[in-house]
Image (cartoon, coloured by chain):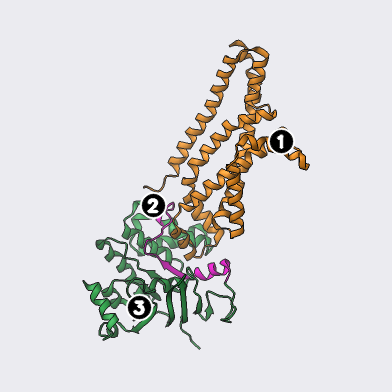
Chain colours: A green, B orange
């Protein structure tokens, strides 16, 4: 029987006294592009980070390919956290691109992309370099492969960030507000790259404030507010929605 | 002056001891200090507390007291060491505490996002340390570390006080024999200066080499 690629069920997460995720459930299928929108503090980034366990969730379940990712057993009452070692293996199957790029500053663009291929995928130097070059070419950075992050613009750095994530051939790509830290004129080049990956059929979860982009590329858009999924629907359902919170939010970001 | 020059070979033997002490202390202190520095940065709470107590305590006592304690104090509980060994052990303990702090500070200077980016591509903890954290932290680690090496070379003169015939004690002995304090001290000063000048030159080179982040 086929199952959704990602199954999130009754997820809860608190930071101290603040409940950031309250009973979040969502399924994401292979090849689907899902955008998560919502005001800051609504829990969208936390939800994304729970999926590759950069943030540990407290209660509930996240399964990827039917395997619980954060904990070693299904037994909710006394479950054991997964070891760092196991988590590393899971994470290598999930790609993540960060708002602030987080490129490795001591490595060139090529080396940034190669690191995971070499050390995690255990490819030979030649093969890793070939693949890294392929992906850097795909994101339009052939001339920059030997540049250090400090020698690149924000848009270029973020495209390296994307290449670094997709080169690992992940099951799903997690994009965490990847254009929020960019100068407005650099946003387009990054979104263009994402657009191409969507056309390739890559499964993606996109946390974003770019509404028109979200509506263009997504199969579904999820609106989160105060730690809950308020609406989950197609782009047209979302933008035609009568939901008051959603409309307040949309009106506020249009300004 | 002639006496000072004719005793140069003897002073060179002393210099050799000074360099041996310095080298051994630097090697031990760097290896153990970096390991404990990683421990205090990422280890479990009990380890962090232990290392913190060790580091604060050692840095709070004069190094001379530490040298005397190791050489004259430890035999009381059955630990006897040659002067040379005692000197290396005492100075190493002292330097370890400094390297711990260097390491901790250097690791802290690396943005946590770099660590997360390493996690996100599936690197394991030790791989993240080796390929990401250490290389980035290195440029913050090097300047104080090289100071520390220079300090060790200079501070090693204290080991003469427990009878290790290093450059300092060699000088004293020559002076005792020849009563030519000034010329001998001048030769000694020049040698100490040359050692540290070489160190500071190499430190500038190293820092330039690892200044890959433009700030």
Residue ranking furthest to the right: B78
Q: Residues within 10 Å of mark 2 (few under 14, many from 20)?
A: many
Give the residues in magenta.
A82-109
Residue ranking furthest to the top: B2
Same chain shared by disc 2 and disc 3: yes
Residue bearing mark 3? A225
User: Label 2's element?
Assistant: loop
Residue bearing mark 1? B71
Residue bearing mark 2? A148
Task: Please state if A244 lies on the left or on the right of B161 as rendered.
Answer: left
- The chain ID associated with circle 2 is A
- The chain ID associated with circle 3 is A
Judge whether residue B38 is colored magenta: no
Determine which quarter of the picture holds residue A184: bottom left
Q: Residues within 10 Å of mark 1 (few under 14, many from 20)?
A: many
- The relative height of residue A213 versus residue B196 in the rendered view (above or below) is below
Q: Nearer the viewer, residue A230 or A190?
A: A230
Residue A38 in sight here: yes
Q: x, y percentage for residue A67?
A: 54, 79
Q: x, y percentage for residue B103?
A: 53, 48
**Residue at (70% x, 28% y) in the render:** B163
Task: Please state if B173 lies on the left or on the right of A174 as rendered.
Answer: right
- Alpha-carbon span between mark 2 and mark 3: 39 Å
- Alpha-carbon span between mark 2 and mark 1: 51 Å
């Amino acid at each position: 029987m086929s199952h959704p690629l990602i199954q999130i069920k009754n997820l809860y997460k608190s930071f101290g006294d603040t409940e950031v995720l309250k009973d979040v459930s969502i399924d994401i299928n292979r090849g689907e592009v899902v955008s998560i929108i919502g005001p800051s503090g609504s829990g969208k980034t936390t939800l994304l980070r729970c999926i590759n366990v950069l943030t540990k969730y407290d209660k509930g379940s996240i399964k990827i390919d039917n395997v619980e990712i954060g904990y070693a057993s299904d037994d909710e009452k006394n479950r054991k956290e997964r070891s760092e070692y196991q988590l590393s293996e899971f994470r290598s199957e999930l790609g993540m691109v960060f708002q602030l790029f987080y490129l490795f500053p001591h490595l060139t663009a090529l080396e940034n992309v190669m690191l995971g291929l070499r050390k995690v995928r255990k490819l030979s130097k030649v093969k890793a370099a070939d693949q890294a070059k392929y992906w850097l070419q795909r994101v339009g950075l052939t001339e920059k492969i030997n540049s250090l992050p400090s020698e690149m613009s924000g848009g270029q750095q973020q495209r390296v960030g994307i290449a670094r994530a997709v080169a690992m051939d992940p099951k799903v790509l997690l994009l965490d507000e990847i254009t929020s830290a960019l100068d407005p004129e650099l946003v387009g080049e990054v979104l263009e790259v994402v657009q191409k990956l969507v056309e390739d059929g890559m499964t993606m979860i996109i946390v974003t404030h770019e509404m028109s982009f979200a509506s263009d590329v997504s199969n579904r858009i999820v609106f989160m507010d105060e730690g809950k999924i308020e609406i989950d629907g197609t782009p047209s359902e979302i933008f035609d929605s009568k939901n008051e919170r959603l409309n307040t939010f949309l009106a506020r970001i249009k300004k | 002056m002639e006496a000072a020059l004719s005793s140069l070979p003897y002073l060179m033997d002393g210099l050799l001891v000074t360099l041996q002490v310095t080298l051994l202390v630097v090697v031990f202190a760097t290896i153990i200090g970096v390991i404990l520095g990683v421990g205090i940065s990422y280890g479990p709470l009990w380890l962090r507390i232990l290392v913190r107590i060790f580091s604060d305590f050692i840095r709070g006592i004069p190094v001379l007291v530490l040298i005397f304690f190791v050489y004259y104090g430890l035999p009381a509980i059955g630990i006897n060491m040659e002067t040379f060994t005692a000197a290396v052990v005492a100075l190493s303990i002292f330097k370890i505490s400094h390297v711990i702090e260097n390491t901790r500070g250097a690791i802290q200077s690396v943005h946590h996002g770099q660590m997360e980016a390493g996690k996100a591509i599936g690197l394991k903890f030790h791989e993240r340390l080796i390929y990401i954290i250490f290389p980035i932290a290195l440029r913050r680690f090097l300047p104080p570390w090289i100071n520390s090496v220079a300090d060790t070379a200079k501070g090693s003169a204290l080991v003469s006080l427990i009878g290790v015939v290093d450059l300092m004690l060699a000088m004293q002995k020559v002076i005792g024999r020849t009563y030519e304090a000034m010329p001998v001290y001048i030769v000694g000063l020049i040698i100490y200066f040359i050692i540290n000048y070489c160190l500071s030159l190499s430190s500038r080179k190293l820092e330039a080499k690892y200044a890959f982040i433009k700030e």
